């Protein structure tokens, strides 16, 4: 990927820039908890977006996406926003840095990536973090701190891409560290690295390669449900809600909102239980919690789909330790905690049964927990 980008940059711009990369992410547990002030447990992976960048002394950005094979130019004022979805991420990062008083001048860039799109691995956060990190390095002497870089990515989603996401993906992409998962408290923003290197297990992603494009931004709708219930309880977020409190207002809220909030309250506790279990080396409990999360995401939060429920069922039947849908939902991957001795048989069975049912093979990724945003060494 590196050579491909460098070759093209040289051809297109006749010079050489600096290379940066940032990673996609997995999340062991803690889904849809970030925007509710709860805990998440992500890690960066070895799939990245990589960009070569060089200031061009002009007042415009010239950027080429190798994977989409599209070239876009835009200025740096609000009215210069490009229409292409992928370019809006880059534009948004520039604007959000400027809004915070940071400096961004014109630059040239070529980028490519191997984070699969639409698989729930946060290719968009990888793209945002790559550019946020790079522009901080190139124009701001790295004076913007890492949390702010993550927030710049998150604000880009909110203000330029229409997704009211939480902070997990950008946090993971910026803070990721090889061999470590991270537990983040999304209210206090305190975080802790957890070395994750189980001897007898590994994490495997099964990518259904389906993405259900749903109308009316269902992600934002889930968030609105949670915010409505929090308001009804007189709380800032569901972080401080309990099932007793929720049951106390059950008659005043819709059944839909009730089940959304129920999932979030339960999921919050599951993250903490998984941390304790990990520290005790108790992977059976970790896995059981993952299955509980899947059930909640499927039945209460309703962000799963038949393909992902099917893959979860296959994992369960085969005795896989833990399995659940991962990320925002409506398609993408399941994340599976699999005993080493079951790995090959599970992968074989999941691929063949899924193919038989849905007519195409899922993709398998063995998770390698890696570093987040960085300057790529020459
Ligand atoms: C998406 C969002 C995150 C998070 C997850 C669900 O990936 O970008 O902020 O809410 O969904 O856990």
Image: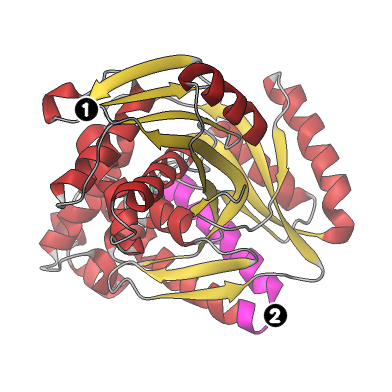
Extreme-bottom residue of the structure: 280
- Name which residue lies at 38% across and 58% down: 263
Query: Which is more foreground, mark 1 or mark 2?
Result: 1
- Name which residue lies at 77% across and 23% down: 356
Q: Which residues are magenta?
A: 278-300
Q: Kindly state the secondary structure of the residue where label 2 is placed.
A: loop
Q: Is residue 255 visible?
A: no
- Which quadrant does the N terminus fall into? top right
Classified by dominant secondary structure, the portion drawn in magenta counts as helix
Q: Position of residue 364 (x, y in %)?
A: 73, 39
Q: Which mark is residue 283?
A: none
Way the structure is coloured: secondary structure
Tell me if residue 14 is in the magenta stretch: no
Mark 1 nearby-residue class (10 Å; few <14, some 14–19, many ≥20): some
Q: Nearer the viewer, residue 169 or 216?
A: 169
Q: Kindly state the secondary structure of the residue where label 1 is placed.
A: loop
Q: Position of residue 144 (x, y in %)?
A: 28, 60
- Name which residue lies at 46% across and 44% down: 126
Q: Which residue is mark 1?
A: 59
- Left or right, 159 with respect to 331, comes to left
- Going from N to C along the chain, the mark reached first, 1 or 2, is 1
Q: CA distance from mark 1 to mark 2?
A: 55 Å
Q: Position of residue 245 (x, y in %)?
A: 22, 72
- Left or right, 217 with respect to 5, comes to left
Q: Which mark is residue 281?
A: 2
Q: Tell me if label 1 and label 2 are in contact, CB under 8 Å.
A: no
| Vertical comparison of 87 with 256: above or below | above
- Name which residue lies at 59% across and 30% down: 6
Q: Nearer the viewer, residue 74 or 168?
A: 74
């Amino acid at each position: 990927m590196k050579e491909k980008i460098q070759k093209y940059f040289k051809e297109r711009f006749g010079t050489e820039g600096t290379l940066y990369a940032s990673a996609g992410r997995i999340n062991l547990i803690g889904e849809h908890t970030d925007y509710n002030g709860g805990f998440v447990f992500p890690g960066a992976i070895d799939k990245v977006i990589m960009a070569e960048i060089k200031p061009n002394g002009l007042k415009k950005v010239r950027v080429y996406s190798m994977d989409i094979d599209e070239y876009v130019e835009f200025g740096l004022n609000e009215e210069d926003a490009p229409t292409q979805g992928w370019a809006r991420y880059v534009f948004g990062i520039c604007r959000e840095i400027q809004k915070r008083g940071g400096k961004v001048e014109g630059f040239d860039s070529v980028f490519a990536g191997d984070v699969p799109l639409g698989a729930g691995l946060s290719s968009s956060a990888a793209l945002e973090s790559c550019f946020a990190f790079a522009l901080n390095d190139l124009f701001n002497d790295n004076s913007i701190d890492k949390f702010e870089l993550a927030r710049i990515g998150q604000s880009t989603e909110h203000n330029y891409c229409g997704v009211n996401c939480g902070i997990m993906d950008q946090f993971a992409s910026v803070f990721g560290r090889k061999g470590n998962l991270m537990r983040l408290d999304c209210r206090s923003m305190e975080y802790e690295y957890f070395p994750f290197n189980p001897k007898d297990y590994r994490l495997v992603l099964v990518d259904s390669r389906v993405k259900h494009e749903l109308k009316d931004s269902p992600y934002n709708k889930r968030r609105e449900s949670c915010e409505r219930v929090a308001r009804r309880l007189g709380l800032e977020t569901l972080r401080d809600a309990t099932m007793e409190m929720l049951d106390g207002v059950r008659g005043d809220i819709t059944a839909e909102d009730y089940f959304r909030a129920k999932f979030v309250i339960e999921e919050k506790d599951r993250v903490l239980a998984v941390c304790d279990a990990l520290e005790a080396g108790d992977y059976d409990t970790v896995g059981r919690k993952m299955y509980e999360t899947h059930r909640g995401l499927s039945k209460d939060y309703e962000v799963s789909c038949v393909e992902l429920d099917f893959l979860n069922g296959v994992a369960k039947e085969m005795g896989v330790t833990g399995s659940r849908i991962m990320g925002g939902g409506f398609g993408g991957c399941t994340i599976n905690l699999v005993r080493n001795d079951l790995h090959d048989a599970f992968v074989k069975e999941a691929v063949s049964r899924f193919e038989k049912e849905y007519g195409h093979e899922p993709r398998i990724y063995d998770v390698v927990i890696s570093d987040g945003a960085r300057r790529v060494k020459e």
